[in-house]
Amino acid sequence: MTQKATAYNLIAIIGPTASGKTAFAASLAARMNGEIISADSRQIYKRMDIGTGKDLSDYTVKGQTVPYHLIDIKEPGYKYNVFEYQRDFLQAYEAIKSRHKLPILCGGTGLYIEAVLKGYRLLPVPENRTLRQSLEGKTLDELTSILRTYKTLHNTTDTDTPKRAIRAIEIEEYYKNHAPADECPYPNLQALIIGIDIDREKRRERISQRLRQRLDEGMAEEVSRLLDEGISAENLIYYGLEYKYLTLYVTGSIGYDEMFNKLETAIHQFAKRQMTWFRGMERRGFTIHWIGFDTPLEEKIAFVAKEFGKLPYICAT
């Protein structure tokens, strides 16, 4: 007897920064009656717009705004985590399905994407003050070495400051001693995963161009406003990349040229780590259908529609 194919109930559009995945996902959603669930660990924060590259105009397709979720849901300074993302994703997913729309996951935060697609049984991790006190004063290299003593690292791509590394150790230590509850409900997600494959040099060119554009649009002024609101420099630096280096620049710790050069390098490195994560997903059993960045939009949409049509779509569970 031939086994019946499992239906898709989700499309995931993934890719490194500057790959154009958001604009593509929005066009796809407009064509396929879908709504987008963001998978970006920093776009959840309100008023952190330029630095996180929200580009909300991308969600307007032919004059119509494509519904999106998990953007602008938390105040700056809040420490959001992967457990909360999994919970919030499921709420958005079920709401979209209840409207008989197609959920489209789109983003570049590999840990968030893999956590929901794999259906990891996650637990909220409370603060461990004793552990934090024992780690205070250690260098980032020392903290990274401690992280490597755990069998499973939380997310090495995000440990670019001591504070983030300490949180990662805290999470690993908690999971080491607390087994996630097997009875935690989680839907059986069958995702068609589409990756945007952009040439390394083209990616670097777009990253540098976007950085200059966002600085011209007022990215430094955005950081200044957040500091004026009372968000601490430490909290902004915690978010990494643009907020790390722009905060150091705005507070006078580094000059403009140093800020630009270090940030540009950091974003290039980040994009490379994103691709490393996605390639790792393939080794861990995910099938990713790669589409070239330069492929015309209509061809991209046709490709996805063809792959999606190979299995039936379940509109409601």
Image (tube, grey):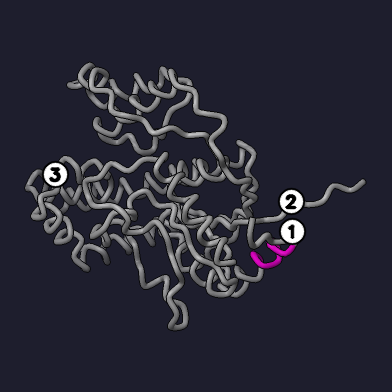
Name the amino acid, label 3: Ala
Q: Earlier in the sequence, mark 2 or mark 1?
A: 2
Name the amino acid, label 1: Leu
In the rendered image, residue 255 lying in the magenta stretch gets the answer no
Boundaries of the magenta span: 303-309
Residue hosting label 2? 6
Disc 2 secondary structure class: loop
Q: Nearer the viewer, mark 2 or mark 3?
A: 2
Q: Residue visible at 33% across and 54% down? A: 44
Q: Which mark is residue 311?
A: 1
Disc 3 secondary structure class: helix
- The answer to whether 125 appears left or right of 161 in the picture is right
Residue hosting label 3? 233
Q: Earlier in the sequence, mark 2 or mark 3?
A: 2
- Residue 33, compared with residue 21, is above or below; it is below
**How far apart are the two marked residues, 2 and 3, measured between alpha carbons?**
49 Å
Q: Quadrant of the C terminus?
A: bottom right
Do the residues bearing badges 2 and 1 touch, measured as CB atoms within 8 Å? yes
Percent from the top left, x then y, of residue 183?
Answer: 56, 32
**How far apart are the two marked residues, 2 and 1, measured between alpha carbons?**
7 Å
Quarter where residue 70 is shown: bottom left
